[in-house]
Amino acid sequence: MTDNCVGDPRFFQRSGPYKLAVVADVASAETPEEDIWLKGVAPLQTAGPDDVSFLDNPRYARALELTSAGAVIIHPRFRDRLPRSSIPLVTTTPYEAWARVAALFHPAPPVKPGIHRSAVIANDAEIDASCEIGALCVIEAGVILGPRCRVGPGAIIGSGTIIGSDCRIGTHASVSHALVGARVYVYPGARIGQEGYGFAATTNGFLSVPQLGRVIIEDDVEIGANTTIDRGSTRDTVIGVGSRLDNLVQIGHNVILGRCCVIVAQVGISGSTVLEDFVRVGGQAAMAGHLRIGTRAEIGAQAGVISDVESGACILGSPAQKKHEFFRQIAMLKKLARRPIPGR
């Protein structure tokens, strides 16, 4: 690329330029009096006079002082540190404003209605005429796809699955035994609705238990690449509205996630565990089965959770414990490590 803007046009659609007043309106920021045109977004370090940038993390305040950006989305407390050559777009929610402005200059590519000639579609599948079905897709019997869905190349939609409007099913993803809401994004390689890990131990070995539940994915959920969500055994596995699952997450059978849960990469949640609304789980954390994690609880990275967690708690470590207890033990271990060893 020959300019400072992010978003290589080979990969990302571009829009604009836009007048400063339009950008300020999208950002819900104070509207400056200047009348300039802005052509894109860029980080503070490389932005030029035609670019919009932002500051959300105080760690980058020095970069703010040195930026050449034409306009910067900032919190009021950083306004005095902005160079005179840059126009402030002041808001109390700069990161949210940045998300909206970046989407203005780089909108999601529109769905291109049509079915690729190599796709395999069951005769009784109901596919809205506004859907885009990619090459080598398989859509089985009884599937219903709502308006404006996009199914990426090589994806498989299993029999009876219902998918709501404006959904995106990524390349080589598979969705079966599932009822999916609206505006759900399933990223490439995800596996939704496969059998859960359930078996009975007998004197002659293991006996698989039929997994007879479904996966219910509510509206506005994102499911990261190569994430797996098992269908329920007798009741359903549920992913609550607005939740965000990172790449490489494992959700066991009968798990229930409430509204707007955040699950970071490589987390494993064992069967029948319930996460209430707004729970946040750090990377590589693991939860035993049949637990209840309370509303707005926070589970630190690599935590091992083996008991219920009360609402609002912040826990760390393995086995997981409350934050203040965890750090008190760490401090005690450091003190013990500094003591001289008798006889040495």
Image (cartoon, rainbow, N blue to C red):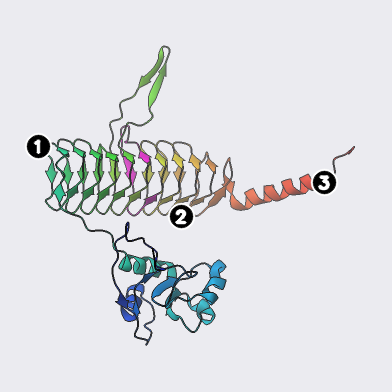
Badge 1 amino acid = Asn
Residue 323 drawn at (x, y percent) = 59, 52
Depth check, mark 3 against mark 1: the one in front is 1
Does dot 3 land on a helix, a strand or a loop? loop
Q: Are marks 2 and 3 in contact (CB under 8 Å)?
A: no
Q: What residue is disc 3 on?
A: 339
Q: Are marks 1 and 2 in contact (CB under 8 Å)?
A: no
Q: Residue furthest left?
A: 123
State the CA–CA distance, disc 1 to disc 2: 46 Å
- The picture places residue 320, in percent across and down from the top left corner, at 57, 43
Specify which label sits upstream in the sequence, 1 or 2: 1
The kind of residue on which mark 2 rests is Arg
Above-or-below relation of 35 to 340: below
Identify residue type, mark 3: Arg
Per the rendered image, the range of residues in magenta is 227-245
Q: Identify the residue at image location x=20%, y=53%.
A: 165
Judge whether residue 90 can be spotted in this image: no
- Tell me the residue that label 2 is attached to: 296
Q: Residue furthest bottom?
A: 33
Sequence-first tag of 3 and 1: 1
Which is in the foreground here, disc 2 or disc 3? 3
N-terminal of the pair, mark 2 or mark 3, is: 2
When asked about the image quadrant of residue 236, the answer is top left
| Left or right of 187 on screen, residue 298 | right
Is 199 left, or right, of 178 in this rendering?
Answer: right
* Quadrant position of residue 148: bottom left
Please say if 333 is above or below 220: above
Residue ID for mark 1? 123
The residue nearer to you, when weighing 164 against 290, is 164
Mark pair 3, 1: CA separation = 76 Å
Q: Position of residue 24 (x, y in %)?
A: 35, 77
Kindly tell me whether residue 243 is visible in this rendering. Answer: yes
